[in-house]
Image (spheres, rainbow, N blue to C red):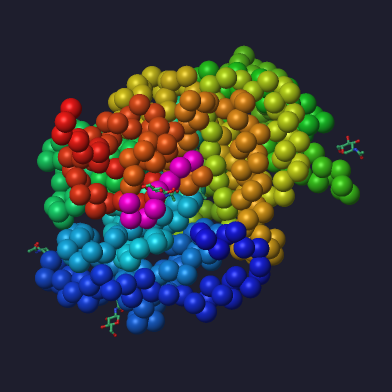
Amino acid sequence: MKALSSTLPIVLIFVLLSISLVAADDSVDFDSFLRCLPTRSNSSVPIADAVLTPANSSFESIYQLRANNLRIFLSTTDRPAAIITALHPSHAQATVVCAKRHGLQIRIRSGGHDFEGLSYTSDVPFVILDMFNLHSIDVDMASETAWVQAGATTGELYYRIAEQSNVHGFPSGVCTTLGIGGHFSGGGYGPLMRKYGLSIDNVIDAQLIDANGRILNRESMGEDVFWAIRGGGTTSFGIILSWRVKLVRVPPRVTVFTVPRTLEQGATELVYRWQQVAPKLPEDIFIRIQPQPINNGGNNRTVRVLFIGHFLGQTDRLIQLMNTNFPELRLQRSDCIEMSWVESTVYWAEFPDGTTTDVLLDRVQVNRSFSKSKSDYYKAVIPRQGLEMLWEALMDIEDIFVQMNPYGGRMEEISESETAFAHRGGNLFMVLYGVTWSESDGGIGAAARYVEQSRRLYRAMAPYASSNPREAFLNYRDLDIGSNESDETDFEDAMEYGEKYFRNNFMRLAGVKTKIDPENFFKNEQSIPPLPMRSGHD
Ligand SMILES: Cc1cc2nc3c(=O)[nH]c(=O)nc-3n(C[C@H](O)[C@H](O)[C@H](O)COP(=O)(O)OP(=O)(O)OC[C@H]3O[C@@H](n4cnc5c(N)ncnc54)[C@H](O)[C@@H]3O)c2cc1C
Ligand SMILES: *[C@@H]1O[C@H](CO)[C@@H](O)[C@H](O)[C@H]1NC(C)=O
Ligand SMILES: *[C@@H]1O[C@H](CO)[C@@H](O)[C@H](O)[C@H]1NC(C)=O
Ligand SMILES: *[C@@H]1O[C@H](CO)[C@@H](O)[C@H](O)[C@H]1NC(C)=O
Ligand SMILES: *[C@@H]1O[C@H](CO)[C@@H](O)[C@H](O)[C@H]1NC(C)=O
Ligand SMILES: CC(=O)N[C@H]1CO[C@H](CO)[C@@H](O)[C@@H]1O
């Protein structure tokens, strides 16, 4: 991300001309790595079919295809020495064993949505283990469970469940191209969160490849490791091959709505009220809000807040509940649309009206953009003057995206230590601040300016957000909150981001890490380090 500080458009040309291969480093024995691979994998599915080096014509296109954030992708010149597009679990096992033996770091990629690109960039010689081809989903209606491979997307999971049942679903993210492998590692949330918790709260088993290349399940990895991989950033502990999930019950018809309110229509008072009401509503109701600046023509800017709702039930009941609990929103029957649960995943992902559920099988994010995101947790209501300051800040910023998601319900019931995901009781809502822009807004050359805008908003909200630590959501990865270099994980540095992401679970995570990966093979700029070695004289 070094090029970010430059605002010259020439950067792009520079990047394209100077793509370099980190494999050139002498200390790394890349040829031996390549020779090692077939000796460690199942010969009936040749690993040669999975290995791409820069000599292969498809290398660059596969690299790019799932490098989702153009801010990261266009600011790095380093390329992996190889991309292993695993076609069989043994290809992933071989990648671990051979990379460890021959001094290469691995970066694990499933859907490639990491906000800071940690699944496809590194400053040291590395290979990408791409799990995208391992995407089978086996739904078993008798036990109401499914085994889902890491490379499957959220959309595929929703689609495959709906093929079998219209009264089952799964609580995961809104975007339908997220990789299950990365998405669950940080928790995984969506509109079913208040009713059923996070994705990881409904995970009952997993297959994990450890640093010795062994495949472990829940029993053989032990409850400590199983605890850590649910929300603790799986990538610090191993490679997820698949998760076994418990499906959840949904009614045959659910109701969705999107209600816009501008400042002139009283949005400030509504948002003030929403903060108190939304975390306490019946668990079947989830109302996200999205304030965004809009132009009223000329230079007259205002803020419009979208109230985006999801209800596990039908319109009549929803209207009753809203009249009782949140009459100020004045939700009308005509605002509500009834549909099946799987159709609601398409609605929530903001596909154009009329898009059919087949879109859930589109596995690749086609329209990529430049982005920088940050997150906050709120345990107290933002006062009216705080909201007014937020509106001012939004109207000041070019392409800002703010999303506020209510907690409460099931999230309040699960204890902070039940899984590694620590943001539970006491949180009113979680906020995403994102700036996104495109090539026509200035592309990579404008990155420094946009990134600074996101930081400015984050600083402005400090008085209202959680503090000591100022908590952050791992799935909304943000290197600003503390990070390390690609190949070293200093414990003190790790504590800085670790407490924000994991609160009191950080030390226990480091303890688990010490047991399963004491040599710290699985690491990145924000991984969990092993506990520091004791000095001996205490
Ligand atoms: C448009 C968009 C919408 C989003 N919406 C939501 C949302 O609604 N809810 C939510 O919770 N999050 C959401 N996110 C965040 C998302 O959950 C995270 O970015 C998540 O990490 C993406 O997983 P991935 O597999 O696609 O990404 P990747 O970039 O492939 O991986 C992300 C991280 O997980 C690691 N990893 C990937 N696969 C494995 C594996 N098999 N084993 C071990 N480690 C692995 C990677 O090394 C990396 O550190 C959204 C992100 C985007 C870009
Ligand atoms: C190799 O993979 C095939 C196909 O998945 C499987 O049938 C076979 O048992 C595997 N062989 C070994 C030695 O694991
Ligand atoms: C990559 O190129 C090598 C050498 O030309 C070739 O043998 C191999 O099949 C190619 N790999 C893939 C996955 O296409
Ligand atoms: C700006 O737009 C709002 C909403 O349309 C309107 O009420 C207001 O009068 C406008 N202000 C100016 C200065 O035009
Ligand atoms: C991608 O962007 C193009 C051009 O803006 C648009 O026409 C197309 O519908 C978009 N595709 C998706 C899937 O959003
Ligand atoms: C990028 C970054 O923050 N790197 C830090 C990693 O840890 C070392 C100490 O071991 C710091 O000096 C770096 O600043």
Residue closest to the eye, 414 or 505: 505
Residue at screen point 27% across, 51% down? 522
Main SS of the magenta part reads: loop
In the current view of this chain or complex, which residue is farthest to the front? 537
Quadrant hosting residue 321: top right
Quadrant hosting residue 504: top left
Q: Is residue 175 visible?
A: yes
Quadrant hosting residue 78: bottom left
Residue at screen point 20% across, 49% down? 519
* Residue 326, position as x, y percentages in the image: 64, 19
Q: Which residues make up the magenta segment?
A: 481-488
* Magenta highlight on residue 487: yes
Side (left or right) of 492 relative to 460: left
Q: Is residue 248 visible?
A: no
* Residue 273, position as x, y percentages in the image: 66, 20
Residue closest to the eye, 363 or 11: 11
* Residue 254, position as x, y percentages in the image: 51, 33
Residue closest to the eye, 315 or 235: 235
* Quadrant containing the C terminus in the rendered view: top left
Residue at screen point 60% across, 30% down? 462
